Amino acid sequence: NAGVMQNPRHLVRRRGQEARLRCSPMKGHSHVYWYRQLPEEGLKFMVYLQKENIIDESGMPKERFSAEFPKEGPSILRIQQVVRGDSAAYFCASSPRVGTNTGELFFGEGSRLTVL
Amino acid sequence: DAKTTQPPSMDCAEGRAANLPCNHSTISGNEYVYWYRQIHSQGPQYIIHGLKNNETNEMASLIITEDRKSSTLILPHATLRDTAVYYCIVSAGANSKLTFGKGITLSVRP
């Protein structure tokens, strides 16, 4: 059973470009969480999604950031018009559906965004 | 904001037990205590969680005080590969986000 898969692992963008980060949850998992880790800082919650629904986006910046988890395919975190302050590691985590969920999150290895 | 307090760092000798403390004095009755660790810049790794009883798995033991206001993660025989940042988190569990604090940096020395 493959773990949480994130790609790309490393992404370089110039200021003003768009960044798209993808996350495929573990098989059978229908909940996805995105976290951001700035250099030398802790992980900050961004957004929690179930298939086709955003459940909690309290940690998402109000502008330029969006996330989706479509019925088919991976979850996407999209950052428009990137700025240098967006340079960070973005981690995705997944958990099973309700009823099988102990609250444990399974994390991917992260996508490291560098904005030049 | 994180609802736990951990010392910023500690070290222990390889082969010895590492006891990592955590205070969570405002924990609610339905909240669990979770421990994760992050080795270097890898993705966080789940270690163990508990509600009020002590728990043990192949990685560690979790001791929760009777009043549930604090807990201790025990790595029984620390190795160099256990050097990491360890996060103590309280959460309502299923389908609840985890709020990470600063964690405690454990350094295992040879």
Image: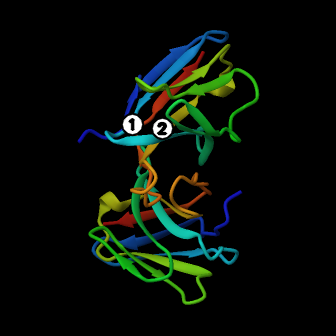
Snapshot colouring: rainbow
Q: Quadrant of the C terminus of chain A?
A: top right
Q: Nearer the viewer, residue B57 or A67?
A: A67
Quarter-wise, where is residue B60 in the image? bottom left
**At label 1, which amino acid type do we have?**
Pro
Quarter-wise, where is residue A46 in the image? top right
Point 47% across, 58% down: residue: A103
Subunit under mark 2: A
Crowd around label 1: few <14 · some 14–19 · many ≥20 (10 Å): many
Label count reads 2
Indicate which disc, 1 or 2, sits on the residue closer to the N terminus.
1
Residue at the spot of label 2: A92
Please state if A21 lies on the left or on the right of B1 as rendered. left
Residue at the spot of label 1: A25
Closer to the eye: label 1 or 2: 1
Quarter-wise, where is residue B89 in the image? bottom right
Subunit under mark 1: A
- State the image coordinates of residue B93 (x, y, percent, origin top left): 53, 61
Crowd around label 2: few <14 · some 14–19 · many ≥20 (10 Å): many
Please state if B31 lies on the left or on the right of A11 as rendered. right
**At label 2, which amino acid type do we have?**
Cys
Q: Quadrant of the N terminus of chain A?
A: top left
The kind of secondary structure element at disc 2 is strand
